[in-house]
């Protein structure tokens, strides 16, 4: 028995239906996604022994308090080691100001130290005690836009505020659970408006104050639900005013608005990407990337905003087919669609092509309507006559080729026989440098190949039999021999495909049956691409 040398070991099964056409613009809101990590246990460059806190500067550099190695380490935003500095005295908290200075709370010596961005000591202040400017286990530290410095004076259950050179200004807080009281405040952060947020650990809450210490609001309670905390050890803000809380006892980060409305969360206990083990510090940079000091795993993890999509560019437009290309050669992407007319109970596709020219900002002008001669469910775009202009071909009956003029308009259609076309692809099937056409027939058990004459016109079709009628077609080098092959998705058997292996001369062998793993629903569409960056192309099917 012939065994097809075709790799189908990663098939993406996506349940889709005909939907309204909705090209969307990305917007960085919503969940955070894992980006990278760095660090391991040890004392070498880039290694950590109890990393407690993390901070970023305006240039995107990252500073880590490597607590039990008695040092600060500085990295790029992707984790490349830059430099380090330190001396006897364990650093607990770290913050930066607008000019790149670095502030460190030295818990052993009950002081705050101020450095340049490369570790040159500028000044220091503090001593053990409970008086103004004295500390008992100072931990969290933050700065505001005016250059003031806020210190979470953990053992004294208060926040102290200083100038950037250490002059004492004010303080607030006492031990307790009332508004403005604290029980082991470990983290402090400020926002662009000057508000101050405090991680009140044993009260399992975040408290918000003005810059002068006036109580504003609070949120949180003991628990593991949304907006609840189990020992919140740190707090951070981003440029948009969102608040991130290191919910250490629940092994997660929670994100809130500046007034405490719950937004999202991520993380769980473990050592995998995006998991945490005894985490302590959290910070956000100007691009809303979030960095976490994953203490027991001796590493820093970086998360970025996951894109969501907004702005429906075409209101109430249904699309039976769609392609993208720069049709007017202005460097901005354009869209061509078959505008469907109804969605329920019957989806009606038309004989027309609507061309929308992109404005370069996610909006579009148009449409300009073209006549394809007959209804169709698929189309393709490519430079069919090698003149540097994008052309269109529709899987109509007959096929319609519309050669582009390079200005967003097209020449009148030319028609070619392609049978009951349901899918079409473009590729150089005979390796002469000109794109050819391959068409899946939705009624007959046929794939039609139309070879390019070299001027954007095509020879009569050559038909290749398949064992079943076809629903979709894709193109790729599926056996790794350097020649393009064709794969069709069958209408009949669930998850079955027919493979036609090309010889590089525009001819194809007998079809070979193959099955896609998973599911028993008939397929709707498929695409070929090299998903695992090896020799042969892979398949992704839409079921």
Image: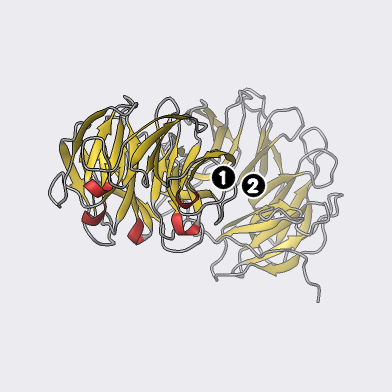
Is residue 442 visible in this depiction of the protein? no
Residue 466: % across, % down:
73, 63
- Residues tagged 1 and 2 counted as in contact (Cβ below 8 A): yes
Between 489 and 396, the residue placed more toward the observer is 489
Reading the image, the residue beneath label 1 is 375
Residue occupying the point 67% across, 64% down: 8
The 10 Å Cα crowd at callout 2, few under 14, some 14 to 19, many 20 or more, is many
Residue 469: % across, % down:
66, 63
Q: Secondary structure at mark 1?
A: loop
Between 125 and 143, the residue placed more toward the observer is 125
Scheme by which the image is coloured: secondary structure
In the image: residue 295, left or right of residue 225: right
Q: Quadrant of the N terminus?
A: bottom right
Residue 41: name its quadrant: bottom right
Residue 217: % across, % down:
17, 42
The 10 Å Cα crowd at callout 1, few under 14, some 14 to 19, many 20 or more, is many
Reading the image, the residue beneath label 2 is 397
């Amino acid at each position: 028995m012939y065994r097809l040398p075709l790799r189908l070991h990663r098939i993406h099964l996506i349940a889709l239906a005909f939907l309204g056409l909705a090209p969307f613009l990305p917007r960085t809101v919503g969940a955070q996604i894992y980006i990278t990590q760095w660090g391991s246990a040890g004392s070498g460059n880039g290694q950590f022994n109890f990393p407690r806190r993390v901070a970023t500067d305006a240039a995107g550099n990252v500073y880590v308090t490597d607590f039990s190695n008695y040092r600060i380490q500085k990295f790029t935003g992707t984790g490349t080691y830059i430099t380090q500095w330190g001396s006897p005295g364990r650093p607990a908290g770290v913050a930066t100001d607008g000019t790149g200075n670095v502030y460190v709370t030295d818990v052993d010596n009950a002081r705050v130290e101020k450095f340049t961005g490369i570790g040159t000591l500028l000044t220091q202040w503090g001593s053990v005690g409970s008086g103004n400017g004295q500390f008992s286990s100072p931990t969290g530290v933050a700065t505001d836009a005016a250059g003031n410095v806020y210190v979470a004076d953990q053992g004294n259950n208060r926040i102290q505020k200083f100038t950037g050179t250490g002059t004492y200004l004010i303080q607030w807080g006492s031990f307790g659970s009332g508004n403005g009281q604290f029980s082991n405040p470990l983290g402090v952060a400020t926002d662009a408006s000057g508000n101050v947020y405090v991680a009140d650990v044993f009260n399992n809450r975040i408290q918000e104050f003005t810059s002068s210490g006036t109580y504003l609001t609070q949120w949180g309670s003991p628990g593991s639900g949304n907006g609840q905390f189990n020992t919140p050890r740190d707090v951070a803000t981003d440029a948009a005013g969102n608040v991130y809380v290191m919910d250490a006892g629940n092994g997660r980060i929670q994100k809130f608005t500046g007034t405490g409305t719950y937004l999202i969360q991520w993380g769980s206990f473990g050592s995998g990407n995006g998991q945490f083990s005894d985490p302590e510090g959290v910070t956000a940079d100007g691009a809303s990337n979030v960095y976490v000091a994953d203490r027991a795993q001796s590493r820093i993890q970086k998360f970025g905003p996951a894109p969501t999509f907004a702005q429906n560019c075409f209101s109430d437009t249904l699309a039976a087919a769609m392609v993208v290309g720069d049709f007017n050669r202005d460097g901005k992407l354009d869209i061509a669609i078959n505008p469907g007319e109804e969605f329920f109970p019957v989806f009606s596709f038309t004989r027309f092509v609507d061309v929308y020219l992109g404005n370069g900002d996610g909006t579009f002008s148009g449409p300009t309507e073209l006549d394809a001669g007959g209804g169709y469910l698929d189309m393709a775009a490519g430079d069919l006559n090698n003149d540097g202009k994008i052309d269109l071909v529709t899987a109509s009956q007959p096929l319609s080729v519309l050669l582009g003029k390079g200005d967003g308009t097209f020449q009148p259609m030319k028609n070619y026989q392609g049978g009951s076309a349901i899918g079409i692809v473009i590729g150089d099937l005979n390796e002469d440098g000109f794109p050819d056409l391959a068409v899946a027939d939705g009624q007959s058990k046929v794939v039609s190949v139309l070879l390019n004459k070299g001027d954007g016109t095509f020879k009569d079709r050559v038909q290749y039999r398949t064992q079943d009628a076809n629903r979709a077609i894709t193109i790729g080098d599926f056996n790794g021999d350097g020649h393009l092959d064709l794969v069709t998705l069958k209408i009949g058997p669930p998850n079955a495909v027919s493979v036609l292996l090309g010889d590089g001369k525009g001819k194809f062998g007998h079809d070979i049956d193959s099955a896609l793993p998973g599911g028993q629903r008939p397929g709707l569409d498929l695409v070929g691409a090299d998903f695992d960056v090896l020799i042969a192309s892979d398949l992704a099917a839409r079921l």
